[in-house]
Image (cartoon, rainbow, N blue to C red):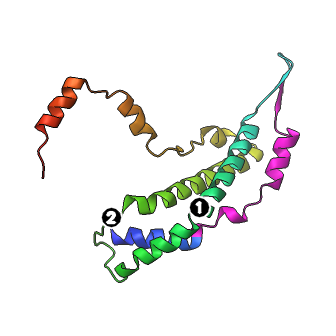
Amino acid sequence: MKYKYIKWLSAFIAIGMSTTTFMRTHFIELALERGIFLEYDTLESKINQSVLSDSLGKLLSQIIQGRKIEESTRELSTKFIAKYEHLKGTPDESIVRVDNFDIISFLVAFDRQEDILNLAIGLYKALDGNAELLRKVKLNPVNPFEEESKQMDYETPSDEEIINWINDYKTG
């Protein structure tokens, strides 16, 4: 990847990896506990989850997940910064080699933060009378390989195809 992305990631690690630590969930928990945003269906005489209530639950869940991710990556943050310290001074457009495992935790943390932001904006607008954005909020997948996993489910080779692939494989 380009070195400038390593610098951006380092800045995110240094500044943004404690974002959820400072988020308070007390009022979200109270609203969910008390059912303030539940809807009553008069035709069926039952209480249903509303878009607001559902989104508050998702927001709470994202904040809790974000805290766990940020907590588990504290040590990784220091290791990442130290491992790529030697690249300082590299031109921004230069391509540098980065181990995927070194960045995956930070990408997951960023996804949770993005989900929190999108839900919070949607909730704010919904409380202001426009729930349209809240209905359209699409959260990042928990599994970053979800689409690839679905595609692989449909790609089941036969025994013959596997043997042919092995026999046709050329080393080095």
Q: Tell me which residue sits at (51%, 67%) in the image.
A: 76
Q: Secondary structure at mark 1?
A: helix
Q: Give the percent coordinates (x, y) of residue 72.
A: 59, 61
Q: Give the percent coordinates (x, y) of residue 22.
A: 72, 65
Q: Give the percent coordinates (x, y) of residue 40.
A: 85, 26
How far apart are the two marked residues, 2 and 1, measured between alpha carbons?
25 Å
Q: Can residue 170 be seen by looking at this rendering?
A: yes
Residue 98: mark in rendering: none
Instruction: Give the number of marks.
Output: 2
Q: Is residue 165 above or below residue 9?
A: above
Q: Which residues are magenta?
A: 16-40
Disc 2: which residue? 1
Observer-nearest residue: 103 or 72?
72
> Between disc 2 and disc 1, whose residue precedes?
2
Residue 72: mark in rendering: 1
Q: Give the residue type that dot 1 points to.
A: Ser
Q: Are marks 2 and 1 in contact (CB under 8 Å)?
A: no
Q: Tell me which residue sits at (82%, 55%) in the image.
A: 26
Q: Tell me which residue sits at (74%, 40%) in the image.
A: 52
* Magenta residue check for 90: no
Crowd around label 1: few <14 · some 14–19 · many ≥20 (10 Å): few
